[in-house]
Image (spheres, grey):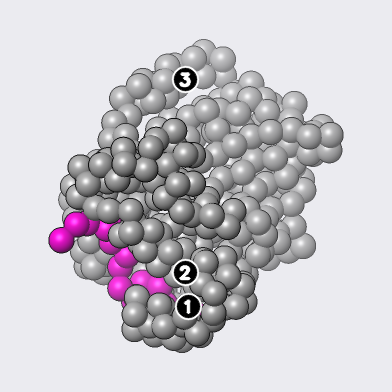
């Protein structure tokens, strides 16, 4: 379950399902979970809230132990109907593809309090996007798995992927291939700005074979109850960390910018962090460390550009910081499996 200072979570269901694939491949999954800071018993209830950093790390561990960084696409693309419980059925029992996509965005907060799904339509396409904040560290493997799951479900409504126009992922291309990647050759782009699926507008009226208005009302009610039952709201530290992450991208992560963005004074922001056992400097350093790890491991962004994005005036200063954080130079870190790195921790006061 969640550690005292860890308020960002995902439900245990994806990890529980991934564990089945791990054991089929002779991976000691219980040992892996313990190594990631998780108690295997917490996965007995698939609706338990699991700390997101540990969950993401477990996905990276799976890829490393399997020595295949693309297999997770197939694992979740092939997930049986019902694997995601209510989240599956609010999509597959909807009256149309459009309604199902909207339902995913609507009920995502019951799956995680830090992952977001958005749905919108423009003149040409319907666009389903999903994201995690950058400051949790590497999450490529989780993103690959979730893309496999979403596309697998969408293809149940279309035929042989005809509803899918394009997929984009914010992570770099895996070194290995997979059945999913081969099936969608030419349809998926890596190193994109965000994770999203583009579909033709004319496909949105397609009716799922399992569409059932009576059953949908039942699962919708269950989904609404899940939303109402969601607890563990994000702490002030979590909100401040996200604003620092946004500020880094905008070129200003000063305490003045962050406090103003949250409608707080500098002093009230500092007090809020003190009450949660940390400080602005510690949270700022934690965010920069986690984003540096994500960019170096998940992307091919040039090291010089990463240094600039994180507010370092010189690449040498960034290199020294990375060595202090991880004991490795930036280029060496890119070659190191993320599951073997020191685990980023939520900052705490001494």
Using the rendered view, name the quadrant where residue 37 is placed.
Answer: bottom left
Q: Main secondary structure of the magenta part?
A: loop
Given this view, does label 3 or label 1 mark the residue nearer the observer? Answer: 1
Label 3, secondary structure: give it: helix
Which residues, given as a range, are shown in magenta? 334-350
Residue for point 42% across, 24% down: 223
Q: CA distance from mark 3 to mark 1?
A: 49 Å
Q: Which mark is residue 144?
A: none
Residue for point 69% across, 53% down: 167
What residue is pinned by disc 2? Answer: 292
Q: Are marks 3 and 2 in contact (CB under 8 Å)?
A: no
Tell which of 255 and 121 is nearer to you: 255
Residue 312 position (above or below residue 8) = below
Q: CA distance from mark 3 to mark 2?
A: 40 Å
What residue is pinned by disc 1? Answer: 318
Q: Residue furthest left?
A: 350
Residue 330 placement (x, y as % from top left): 48, 82
Label 2, secondary structure: give it: helix
Q: Is residue 46 left or right of residue 18?
A: left
The local crowd at label 2, few if under 14, some if 14 to 19, many if 20 or more residues have their Cα within 10 Å, is many
Q: CA distance from mark 1 to mark 2?
A: 9 Å
What residue is pinned by disc 3? Answer: 220
Q: Are marks 1 and 2 in contact (CB under 8 Å)?
A: yes
């Amino acid at each position: 379950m969640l550690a005292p200072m860890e308020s960002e979570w995902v439900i245990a269901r994806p990890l529980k399902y991934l564990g089945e694939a791990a054991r089929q491949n002779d991976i000691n999954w219980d040992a892996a979970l313990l190594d990631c800071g998780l108690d295997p018993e917490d996965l007995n209830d698939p609706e338990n809230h699991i700390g997101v950093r540990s969950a993401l790390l477990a996905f990276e561990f799976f890829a490393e132990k399997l020595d295949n960084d693309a297999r997770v696409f197939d694992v979740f693309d092939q997930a049986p109907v019902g694997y995601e419980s209510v989240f599956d059925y609010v999509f597959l029992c909807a009256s149309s593809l459009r309604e199902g996509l909207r339902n995913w965005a609507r009920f995502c907060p019951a799956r995680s309090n830090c992952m977001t799904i958005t749905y919108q339509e423009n003149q040409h396409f319907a666009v389903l996007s999903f994201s995690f904040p950058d400051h949790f560290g590497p999450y490529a493997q989780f993103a690959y798995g979730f893309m496999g799951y979403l596309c697998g479900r969408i293809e149940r409504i279309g035929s042989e992927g005809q509803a899918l126009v394009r997929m984009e992922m914010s992570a770099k291309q895996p070194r290995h291939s997979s059945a999913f990647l081969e099936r969608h050759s030419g349809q998926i782009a890596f190193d994109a700005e965000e994770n999203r699926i583009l579909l033709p507008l004319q496909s949105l009226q397609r009716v799922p074979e399992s569409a059932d208005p009576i059953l949908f009302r039942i699962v919708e009610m269950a989904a609404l109850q899940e939303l109402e039952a969601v607890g563990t709201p994000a702490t002030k530290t979590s909100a401040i960390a996200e604003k620092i992450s946004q500020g880094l991208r905008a070129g200003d992560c000063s305490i003045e910018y962050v406090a103003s963005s949250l409608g707080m004074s500098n002093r009230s922001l500092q007090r809020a962090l003190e009450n949660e056992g940390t400080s602005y400097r510690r949270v700022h350093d934690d965010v920069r460390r986690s984003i540096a790890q994500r960019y170096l491991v998940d992307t091919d962004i040039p090291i010089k550009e990463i240094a600039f994005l994180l507010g370092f005036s010189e690449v040498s200063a960034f290199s020294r910081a990375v060595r202090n954080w991880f004991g490795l130079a930036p280029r060496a870190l890119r070659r190191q499996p993320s599951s073997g790195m020191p685990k980023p921790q939520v900052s705490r006061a001494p």
